[in-house]
Image (cartoon, rainbow, N blue to C red):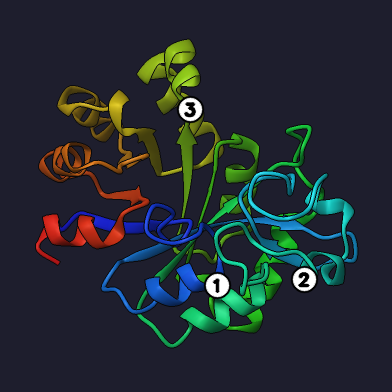
Amino acid sequence: MTTRIASHRGGALQWPENAPTAFRNTAQLPVDQVEFDIHPTSDGEIVVIHDATLDRTTSGTGPVAARSLAELRALTLNGAPGDRIMTLAELTALFAPTAITLRMEVKPDHEHRPYPGLLPRALAVLDEAGMRGRTVVTSFQADIVAEAVAIGGLAGAIWLVAPHVQDDIGLGGIAAVADEIGARAVSLRQNRLDALIRDELRARGLAVGAWAVNDDDAIRKVLKLGVDVFTTDRPSRALELRGR
């Protein structure tokens, strides 16, 4: 099995994260997946941005969900002044002609609460483009992963395991939660993953991925481990080290 590579936020160490420029460049690469994050707008649209607030990556401030799409379009993206925030529909249209799988992280709001109805609305957008079956849903929130599994029709649903959760519940707890929510795949931070952990999770029937895989040593490590898939902010370098 070839380890799959996901361009994280469109390749956040190569181009401005979650920006149209990043996604257009990613679409030209032979990566397996493109990873991105979604939040709702105040007028019912879905936009591609990592944080629940605008402050870090745009010229705006405050919660994303408090702004209309028109208000968000008026903002500039840091590092990409010619770009504007993309909608989920625009991103799906960009990648539909490619062979790249969408890897959609469903984010909580600025108080870390799930957005009511966000996932079904996002899936409706994917369905309009015929892309649900080419989309993997991910989240650090187990309830969102459970919702994705229950709705179905996706290419996969992955529970992202934060280091503090791994510390709190251990591998047995991770496997138990995954079983409870119906997840068949988990992803751990790369510096919290080794061959023993990989083997134990796989022995429990789980596919194993890694995230935060950015420097050369980390990329080489996860390739040697043979993880199922990893996200990286340096997709071009990851492809080189994998041998494309």
Query: At which x and y percent is residue 45?
Result: 80, 68
Please state the total of marks drawn on the protein image.
3
Label 2 vs 3, first from the N-terminus: 2
Element on which disc 3 rests: loop
Quarter the C terminus occupies: bottom left
Q: Kindly identify which residue carries mark 2.
A: 73
Q: Kindly identify which residue carries mark 1.
A: 20
Question: Which amino acid, by three-letter code, is at mark 3?
Answer: Ala
Element on which disc 1 rests: helix
Which of the 4 quarters of the picture holds residue 181?
A: top right
Q: Is residue 203 above or below residue 44?
A: above
Residue reaching furthest top?
Answer: 168
Q: Nearer the viewer, mark 2 or mark 3?
A: 2
Q: CA distance from mark 2 to mark 3?
A: 32 Å
Q: Nearer the viewer, mark 1 or mark 3?
A: 1
Q: Kindly identify which residue carries mark 3.
A: 162
Q: Residues within 10 Å of mark 1 (few under 14, many from 20)?
A: many
